[in-house]
Every structure is written in structure tokens, then in C-alpha cells.
Image (cartoon, grey):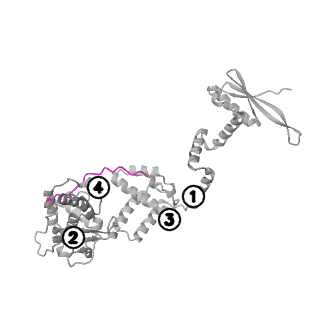
Amino acid sequence: MKTKPILVRERGVTVKIYAGESRKKTKAGKSRRYKLYTLAYYVANERRRETFADLATAKARAREVAVSILHGRLPVLELTNSDSESYLRSIQLLRPIGLPLHTAIEDYVTARSKLEGESLVSVVNDYLSRKRNIPQRRVGEIVDELLLAKEHDGLSPRYVYALKSDLTRFKNSFHTNIGSVTSSAIEDWLMAQGVGARTRNNLRTSIVTLFHFARARGYLAKGQPTEADDVRRAKDRGGKIGILTPKELDSLISKAPAEIKLYLALGAFTGMRTSEIVRLDFSDVNFERGHITVAAEKSKTATRRLVPVLPNLAQWLSPYRSRKGKLLKHSVERRTIVFANGQGIAWPHNCLRHSYASYRLAAIADTARVALEMGNSPQKLMTNYRELTDEHDAAAWFSISPKRSKKIVQFVA
């Protein structure tokens, strides 16, 4: 008796499946029966057949054929029986994770091309094994650990304060494990801060420091770049360089209290960074040889250098020849800015260092020498300070000295 075909319909398109049996001899020579399902459909008036060993696979293929006939895509699906079974099996495996077949193949091929013959599964297993051994730490916990470590290492209070300020902002926005923070999330956060390129890059540097610390502590995979390393640096085109005029400095220094007066003189006539000035002891000033020693541990660049004491600075330093201990307190810059504003004089960012560089370059026209004095690069000097002032302004700047100096010690410039 002839059995009726199984009909698979898809919006008016019907594909038939015929159930039957076949015989196959075993190695022992006996005949064995097994079921066979034959798919039948027409393409361009030509009958096509595909056979399958199980009904579920045959029905799945029948639906694929029906949909393809419906949308006119059948030639794409003209596969051999083994190819059809492979295709359908692939679709079934991908269904739980919701990936299209072509996406899965593209990902697999891309991964294999980078593994130089190594098994993708073995690489994934190795990665998961290492990840399981990494303790989970939240961003805030690691920030606290880092700051304690920096303080224990004896780094400058100014540096630790800046690092704490940057990373406190960061941890307040990332209440998660550090291993979950991606480079795109960091970059989005930086852009949302609404700061300029230089400040953004400074924040990025602090975050990179945090991630490198976490990697060293074993909270991130060792021997690999961190997510923070992949965050691009903002293009810093530099801002306008603000300096004081000789008239402004002369007015300020003549009216300032003693400590602010000393700070103004050191900043204006040596070009040292504020962070370096507040770390100095009076023992760092060599009155006999006419220079100030900026030790490596007191320098921002961690490099020792000798800063010349120019003739007018010698006059400002003369009353302190017998002093000992720290030159200035860390709060002196803040108090100087308040004093200047009280005198009606604007205080551009880092203006004493910028002023020294500008006037010193105009006075001696020796970029390499000025860069060495300031612990900076010649390239940055040429970019930021070249031709901002002339030799007449420079002469006026470096002639500013105490109005009445009873005791002057001569230094060699």
C-alpha cells in the first residue's frame, strides 16, 4: 500500500516528503532495513530530490526550500545532501545564541587566521583558565590601594593629590570590577567630562596608572595591554601661553609679603616648576658656586639638574644665606594667586615658568641651554615660547631686583 507524502507548506508553497525504507547489507552479509525520507520539489520545471535519514532534518530542509522558492532564492540553496545536512545542523547549533551563520563563520575564520594553526577551543580554554584565577576587585578598592602605595613610596604630596583628584572622579562613575571596564567606556567618560585636550590627557594618564597598578597586583591579566592602554590620546594643539609683563612682576614683587616675594623671585628668575620649588631646602642653594640643585627625587622628570642663579636672583636670595630647612610651604602658589588677584593682576596658568622661558630665550637665544635649565625639551620651548618677547623686554625682566639691598652676594650667571 502506497503511503501519502508528508506536506510542508509555507505561505502557499508546498514541499513533499516521502517516507520509505531501504536495505543495506552489513559486514556480516545480512540485510538491514532503515528508514529513508525523500524531499521532492521542482525548480524550473525540473524535479529535485534530496534524501535524509531522519524526519526532523527532512522537515527543516523542506521549510528552507519552501521559503527560498517563495522569495526566489532557490539557486543559492542547491546543495548536495551532505551539504544540506551540514547547513541545517549549523543553523540548529546557532539558534540558541542567536547568531546568523555567516557571522559565526566570519568570527571563526578571523580568529583562526590569528592563531597560526592553534586550536581556537584550546585558546579559549586557556583564556578562561587564566581569567578564573584573577581575583575580582572593584575600581574604588584598587584606587584606594594605589593611593596608599604611592604615599608609602614617598611620592610628592602634590602628585598624590592630583592622582587622588583624578581617580576619585573616575571611581565615582565606575561602581564595578575593573575587569569589566572597557576602553570605549573609559573614552566615553573622558569625553563627558567637558575638559580640554590637555586635562583629558592628564586624566587618561592617571587611569592608565591605575590599570597598570591593577595588572601588577594580579587584578588584570598579566603580560597583556590593559583596556586603558587602548584609549586614544586627545590631540593637544596647545593653548595660549600666558606670561607676566616686567611691569606687572615688578609691582607684585615689590608689594608682596616675604614668602610670596621669595616664591615670585624663584619662579620668575629660574623657571622651576612650583612642585620643584616647594620641595627645595636652603641647602640646595649653592651660594658660592651660583646654582640651585634640583635633585632627581625633587624633579618632575626624575632627573638631577643645576639651575643657574642669575645676578638679580642673587640679590633676592641674599637675606636667606644663613637659613636652613624648607624654602617655602606647599600653599605658597595658592596664596600668591590670591595676592595677585587682590592687586588687580590676572594670573595666567603657570605664568612664572612661561615668563622665564620667554624672556630667557629672548635674552640668550640658546634653546638647548634654556631647555636644560628648565628640565624641558627644546622642541616644546620652540613651539610654545619662540618670539613671544624681545631682548628689550628680557633686559627689563632680569633687571628686577630689590629696591634697597644692603647685602648682595655675587653669582656667576
- Residue that carries the numbered disc 2 in the rendered image: 259
Measure how far apart labels 2 and 1 are at the Cα level: 55 Å
- Residue that carries the numbered disc 1 in the rendered image: 131
Task: Mark 3 vs mark 4: give the one in front.
Answer: 4
Task: Mark 3 vs mark 2: give the one in front.
Answer: 3
Please tell me which residue lies in front, 229 or 370: 370
Type of amino acid under label 2: Glu
Q: Is residue 19 left or right of residue 158?
A: right
In the image, residue 244 above or below residue 411: above
Residue 165: which disc?
A: none
Type of amino acid under label 1: Lys
- Looking at marks 3 and 2 on the same chain, the residue that comes earlier in the sequence is marked by 3
- Residue that carries the numbered disc 3 in the rendered image: 217
In the image, residue 226 above or below residue 7: below
Residue 407 on image: x %, y %: 13, 76
Secondary structure beneath label 1 = helix
